[in-house]
């Protein structure tokens, strides 16, 4: 869809990347590191000590969780590699992994590369809340892990404490490892709160927590991510990571370390508020254009339903660029259960306000005009 956006000159509300760069201090730190020769050669395999310490410090300040930077923190090539290395390091062929559907497409690939089998538990609109009974029913003797994403891409759902408590109970009852993808941890809105699963009783030692700098600092191209886990789990992840990228992004690691250490609460509040404003702008525009909208509690993404147009999401997204010069993603690509996501479409709102205003104007012109003609 991003290629289609380029080919048609459309506004890309499909792929989830910002159209502005991160804080100036972060960018300057990276440039300074390159020019000073810091990290231009292979950094340490687990990541530079400064960044591992900064990641542990961030986790402690924000959530009260204590991790040893030397034995419980690993730096990766973004969260995508962190997920892949975790799955490859912890799974054996034939194992089953329960994941919340719809899910980020790398989950399916990583599980398949490990020779394991994914078992979806579907989140349904309007709230995309967890069906705890379905989660319990999905567990079999072959289940090895739960793969949990909150804040959740693509739905924007944020798991509540009650939902997380139910997940923890299932994990403890069946002695499962839980892998948590928390890359949108600082992008939560309204009354939602991001609660790391590792903070719940009994979960610190069985949870592999994953996050990254890309979404928080608007530098998705840097690919600096991290894994936090108890030493036995982290050792397995590190063994797999060593044969994937080995090391990555040396100068960027120094810059991210400095940002984690120096950017205070105001930065994170500003990040949240600016994205919430953009979420509200796009939600209002889609609603005005006639789309039922499921307003997200977190992430970059908002889901709309196109069933009232008499087409499925895939057909709608293929025609949208040429109809009004906007690109979106059909949510069905994130589902095993294609019927469940057939009419849903994901729009990204991590764009500059003028860009979103332009996109909203195009959508309203195309679809309000279309509705007017159908009514004549």
Image (cartoon, rainbow, N blue to C red):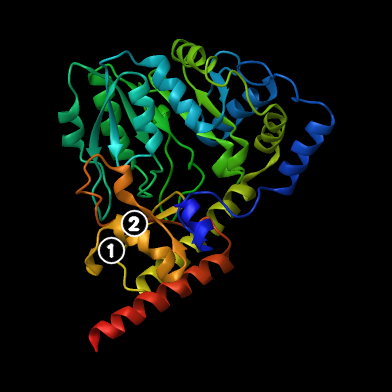
- Picture layout, residue 253 above or below residue 351: above
Dot 1 falls on a residue whose secondary structure is: loop
- Compared across the picture, whether 340 is left or right of 24 comes to left
Relative placement, left or right, of 185 versus 352 is left
Mark 1 and mark 2: Cα distance apart in space: 7 Å
SS for tag 2?
A: strand
In the foreground, 13 or 138: 13
Give residue 211's position: percent from left, percent from top. 51, 33
Q: Give x and y (percent) for residue 99.
A: 30, 33
Which quadrant would the C terminus be assigned to in this image?
bottom left
Q: Which mark is residue 306?
A: 1
Q: For residue 116, which numbered disc appears in the image?
A: none
Residue at position x 53%, y 15% from top? 243
Q: Residue furthest front?
A: 7
- Give the residue drawn at x 57%, y 40%: 214
Q: Quadrant of residue 25?
A: top right
Q: Quadrant of residue 144?
A: top left
Q: Is residue 3 left or right of residue 159?
A: right
Residue 359: in sight, yes or no? yes
Q: Residue 280: in sight, yes or no? A: no
Asked where in the image residue 28 lies, by quadrant, the reply is: top right
Residue 295 vertical placement versus 201 (above, below): below
Residue located 52% across and 71% down the image: 358
Q: Nearer the viewer, residue 355 or 188?
A: 355
- Which residue is found at the position 42% from the left and 29% from the top? 199
Residue 376 against residue 94 in the figure, above or below: below
Q: Residue furthest bottom?
A: 376
Asked if marks 1 and 2 touch (Cβ < 8 Å), the reply is yes
Q: Which residue is mark 2?
A: 345
Percent from the top left, x then y, of residue 171? Answer: 28, 23
Q: Residues within 10 Å of mark 2 (few under 14, many from 20)?
A: many
Q: Earlier in the sequence, mark 1 or mark 2?
A: 1
């Amino acid at each position: 869809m991003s290629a289609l956006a380029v080919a048609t000159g459309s506004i890309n509300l499909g792929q989830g990347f910002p159209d502005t760069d991160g804080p100036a201090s972060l960018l300057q730190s990276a440039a300074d590191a390159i020019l000073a020769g810091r990290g231009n050669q292979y950094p340490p395999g687990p990541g530079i000590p400064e960044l591992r310490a900064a990641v542990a410090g961030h986790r402690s300040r924000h959530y009260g969780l204590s991790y040893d930077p030397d034995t419980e923190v690993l730096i990766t090539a973004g969260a995508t590699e962190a997920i892949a290395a975790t799955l490859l390091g912890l799974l054996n062929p034939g194992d089953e992994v329960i994941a919340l559907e719809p899910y980020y497409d790398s989950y399916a690939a990583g599980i398949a590369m490990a020779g394991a089998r994914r078992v979806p538990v579907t989140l349904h609109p309007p709230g995309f809340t967890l069906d705890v009974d379905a989660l319990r029913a999905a567990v079999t003797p072959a289940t090895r892990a739960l793969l949990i994403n909150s804040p959740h891409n693509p739905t924007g759902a944020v798991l509540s404490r009650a939902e997380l408590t139910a997940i923890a109970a299932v994990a403890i009852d069946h002695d499962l490892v839980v892998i948590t993808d928390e890359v949108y941890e600082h992008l939560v809105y309204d009354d939602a709160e991001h609660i790391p699963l590792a903070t719940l009783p009994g979960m610190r030692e069985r949870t592999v927590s994953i996050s990254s700098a890309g979404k928080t600092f608007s530098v998705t191209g840097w690919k600096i991510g991290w894994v936090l886990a108890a030493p036995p789990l982290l050792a397995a992840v590190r063994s797999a990571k060593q044969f994937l990228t080995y090391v990555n992004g040396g100068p960027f690691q120094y810059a991210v370390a400095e940002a984690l250490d120096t950017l205070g609460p105001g930065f994170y509040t500003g990040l949240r508020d600016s994205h919430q404003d953009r979420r509200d702008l796009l939600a209002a525009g889609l609603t005005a254009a006639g789309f039922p909208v499921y307003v997200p509690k977190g992430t970059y993404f908002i889901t709309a339903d196109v069933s009232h147009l008499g087409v499925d999401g895939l057909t709608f997204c293929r025609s949208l660029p040429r109809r009004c010069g906007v690109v979106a993603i059909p949510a069905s690509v994130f589902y095993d259960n294609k019927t469940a996501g057939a009419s849903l479409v994901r729009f990204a709102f991590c764009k500059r306000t003028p860009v979103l205003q332009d996109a909203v104007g195009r959508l309203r012109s195309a679809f309000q005009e279309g509705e007017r003609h159908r009514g004549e």
